[in-house]
Structure formats: C-alpha cells, structure tokens
Amino acid sequence: MNLIGNPGFETGTFASWMTYNVTINRRYVQTGFFSAELAGGMTNAYIQQVVPIIPNASYQFVISLAKSSSLRAPMMSIFLLFLDASQKTVALGFALSMRTLNQPDSQTGAWKTIVESTTIAPASAAYALVFIHKVPQDQSSPVVVDDIGLYALGGGGNTPVDYTEIRNLLLSYMATKSVIVIMTAGQPTGTAGTVTSVGTNVVTITTNAGSTMTIPFEKITNIETA
C-alpha cells in the first residue's frame, strides 16, 4: 500500500502536500493527467509530506522526475526523515542528490524513476517526512515530479516487499514497447532494452544487443526512458 497521499497529484491539487513555488503541470506527466512542477532558476522550490509509519520496519521510496525545459537540470535534494509522535526528528531514512545533467527531458517523453530503500525506522518513530527540494541555480530548468510512492518493506524479513509501483511502471513500459534503461546497484551505466515480461519480483528485458536479461526488483535503483 502506498503511504503517500495524492501521490500522482491526480486530484489536480496539492492535497496532502505542503509546497513552496510549485504548480500543477498538465502538459508533462509520467502517468495520469497531472504532475507537480518545481520552479526553475534561482527560485527555491520544494514539496513535502508527513505520513504515519510503523516503527522497526524499512521502507521503499519511488519517484519519477524530469526537467521541463531545454535549460540545464538543477541540483535536486531528496530525503526522508523518521519522526517521533511529536514530529521531532529521530533518524535519517535516506538522503540523495541529483546533479546537473542527471535528469532527462520531459519534452521528449523521457523520465527518470528513482528507487531508494530506507534504513530501519527506530522504535520511537511514528511518522516519516518526505522532502523533495529543487535547489536554486541560475539558468536552470523547472523540474516535474510524478508518481511518488512510499511502501513498507517490513521488519526482520517477515513481511513481503511491496513492489506495486515498480511492477505497474514496468507493465506500462511493456505495453507501450518503450526502450528503457534499468540501472542496478554496482552497474551505474545501466542496461537498455524493452520489457518482455514482468513477474512478481523480477523483470525480463530484451537488450538492445539482442540478449535476454532477468533483473530482480530489489536490485533496481533507477529506471529511465531512453
């Protein structure tokens, strides 16, 4: 179950989100009809959401993003904090940044999907804060974000991993026969090809070189449209 409220902005509003210098975009979307556009240039822009979580469990975060103009991509900072019942920070779940030129151009239909796993939430954790920040940078493009997810991975290995978001995304790529690039841990350049089948926990692709490769969902770090 996705813990994020209004994850694809399909209400046409920012219900469930706190935002700063962000607008609803109807032109560039990963799925559905809407996305959120973080203002470009020297403007500071972010979206954030606080959601209830279960302690002693880890979580999987998913987000799709792209720049929405021909200007250079700005720095993006994305992190998750675990909060206690009074919403004070008790631990860092993860933190990552995307540097210039590391984002595809939504005008060409290209998006980057990031998959990130958190640390285990402390026993005192009651909430998670998801923060997505576009860093001010001169002559930089706005950034559109879509299909944001946070899924419980379970604690102690007793709960099955929820790969709903990744599976649905890969199924959509298979239906459209899109050429994608899948990056895995230890292979930052990725593998390009088309999706031929999607299982419960794995995806099989036919690479551009003509070979077949099966990749476990747990190894996927990024997915981009080529």
Image (spheres, grey):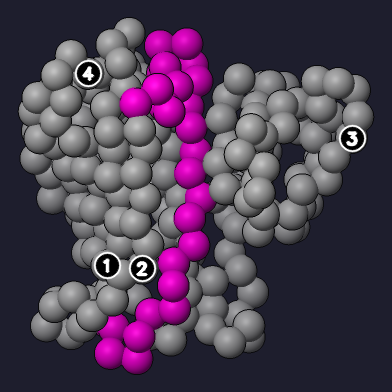
Q: Amino acid at mark 3?
A: Thr
Q: Is residue 136 magenta?
A: no
Instruction: Measure the C-alpha gap from mark 4 to mark 2.
Output: 28 Å
Real-space CA distance between mark 2 and mark 3, rounded to the nearest whole angstrom: 35 Å
Per the rendered image, the range of residues in magenta is: 100-126
Q: Which residue is mark 2?
A: 93
Q: Where residue 7 appears, x then y in whole percent?
A: 35, 48
Instruction: Return the disc, 1 or 3, that comes first in the chain's sequence.
Output: 1
User: Callout 4: few (<14), some (14-19), or many (20+) C-alpha neighbours within 10 Å?
Assistant: many
Q: Is residue 35 visible?
A: no
Q: Secondary structure at mark 2?
A: strand
Q: Position of residue 177 (x, y in %)?
A: 72, 22
At mark 3, the secondary structure is: strand
- The residue carrying mark 4 is 140
**Which is the main secondary structure of the residues drawn in magenta?**
loop
Q: Residue at x 18, y 14 (%)?
A: 139
